[in-house]
C-alpha cells in the first residue's frame, strides 16, 4: 500500500510539472506568433558564470531617439549655423560614463525602440543604458538576452572586425525580448546562423 501511495504522489507531481512546462511553452509559442518581431544588432556579453552552459549572452541595441533622457542636459542635438536644432537624433553627453533609465520596448518601422518611462515599476519595463558620446540609436538593454546553442555547435564569437551579430526577437507586452534566431552581417550581406 505504501508503494501505491508513493506512485500516486509521484504521478501527481509529474502531472503538475508537465503542466507548468507546457504552459510556459504554450505562452512562448503564442508570443512568437502574435507579438511583433524585429531584428536588432547585438553585442556579445560574457557574464563569467561557472555553470552557464552553452549559450551566448547578448546585449541588444535599441533606438532611443524617440525617447528622452532622465535629464535634458545629457542630450546634445545637432544644430544649424543659426543655433536651431537640425535633427532630433541626439548624442548622449554628461558627466557620467553611463546613463540608465527604465523604458518600455516596442517595434516601430522595423526598429526596436525604447521609450523612457518616468516612474520605474511595472515588470514590462526594461532598463536601457546610454553611453557618453554615443548616438541615441545605439543604446543597449542593460539585461542581456541568452541565446542557447547545442553542445557541439560552433560559436560565432568572437565576431570579426567589421562584422555585426544580429538577433531576431519577439517583443512581448511584458518582460524582456525573446530570442528567435541569429545572423551575421558581413560587408552588408546577411548570413543566417544555424546551430545544429
Image (cartoon, rainbow, N blue to C red):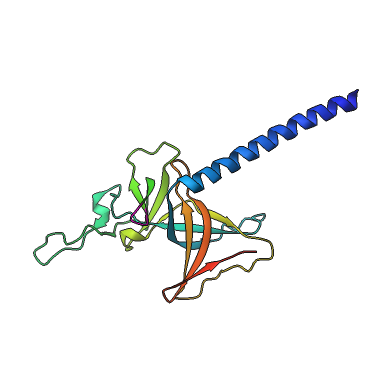
Q: Does any portion of residue 63 appear in the rendered image?
A: yes
Q: Quadrant of residue 74?
A: bottom left
> Which residue sits at x=35%, y=37%?
119
Q: Nearer the viewer, residue 12 or 164?
A: 12
Q: Looking at this rendering, what residue extends furthest in the left direction? A: 82
Judged by its main secondary structure, the magenta piece is: strand
- Residue 137 lies, in percent from the top left, at 33, 59
Q: Position of residue 123 (x, y in %)?
A: 45, 38
* Most foreground residue, 174 or 28: 28
Residue 52 within the segment the image draws in magenta: no
Instruction: Report the span colored magenta.
Output: 108-112
In the rendered view, would you say 14 is above or below 87?
A: above
Q: Is residue 102 visible?
A: no
Q: Is residue 92 above or below residue 105?
A: below
Q: Quadrant of residue 140?
A: bottom left
State which quadrant residue 124 falls in.
top left
Outermost residue toward the front?
A: 33
> In the rendering, at what x and y percent does residue 108 appear?
34, 52
Location of residue 179 in the rendering, given as x and y in whole percent from the top left corner = 52, 54
Q: Is residue 59 left or right of residue 15?
A: left
Query: What residue appears at the point 43 percent right and 59 percent down from the top-left corner?
Result: 39
Taking the spot 38% from the left edge, 48% from the top edge, the residue there is 106
Q: Is residue 51 above or below residue 123?
A: below
Of residues 40 and 158, the one drawn nearer to the viewer in this rendering: 40
Q: Which quadrant would the N terminus be assigned to in this image?
A: top right
State how many labels appear. 0
Of the 4 image quadrants, the one containing the C terminus is bottom right
Amino acid at each position: 500500500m505504501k508503494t501505491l501511495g508513493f506512485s500516486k504522489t509521484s504521478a501527481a507531481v509529474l502531472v503538475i510539472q508537465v503542466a507548468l512546462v507546457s504552459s510556459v511553452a504554450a505562452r512562448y509559442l503564442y508570443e512568437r506568433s502574435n507579438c511583433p518581431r524585429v531584428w536588432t544588432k547585438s553585442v556579445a556579453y560574457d557574464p563569467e558564470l561557472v555553470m552557464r552552459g552553452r549559450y551566448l549572452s547578448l546585449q541588444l541595441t535599441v533606438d532611443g531617439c524617440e525617447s528622452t533622457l532622465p535629464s535634458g542636459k545629457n542630450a546634445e542635438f545637432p544644430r544649424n549655423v543659426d543655433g536651431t536644432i537640425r535633427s532630433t537624433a541626439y548624442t548622449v553627453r554628461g558627466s557620467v560614463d553611463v546613463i540608465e533609465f527604465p523604458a518600455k520596448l516596442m517595434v516601430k518601422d522595423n526598429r526596436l525602440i525604447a521609450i523612457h518611462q518616468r516612474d520605474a515599476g511595472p515588470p514590462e519595463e526594461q532598463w536601457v543604458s546610454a553611453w557618453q558620446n554615443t548616438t541615441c540609436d545605439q543604446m543597449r538593454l542593460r539585461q542581456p538576452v541568452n541565446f542557447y546553442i547545442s553542445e557541439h555547435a560552433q560559436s560565432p564569437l568572437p565576431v570579426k572586425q567589421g562584422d555585426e551579430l544580429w538577433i531576431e526577437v519577439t517583443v512581448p507586452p511584458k518582460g524582456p525580448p525573446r530570442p528567435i534566431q541569429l545572423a551575421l552581417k558581413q560587408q552588408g550581406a546577411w548570413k543566417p546562423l544555424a546551430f545544429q
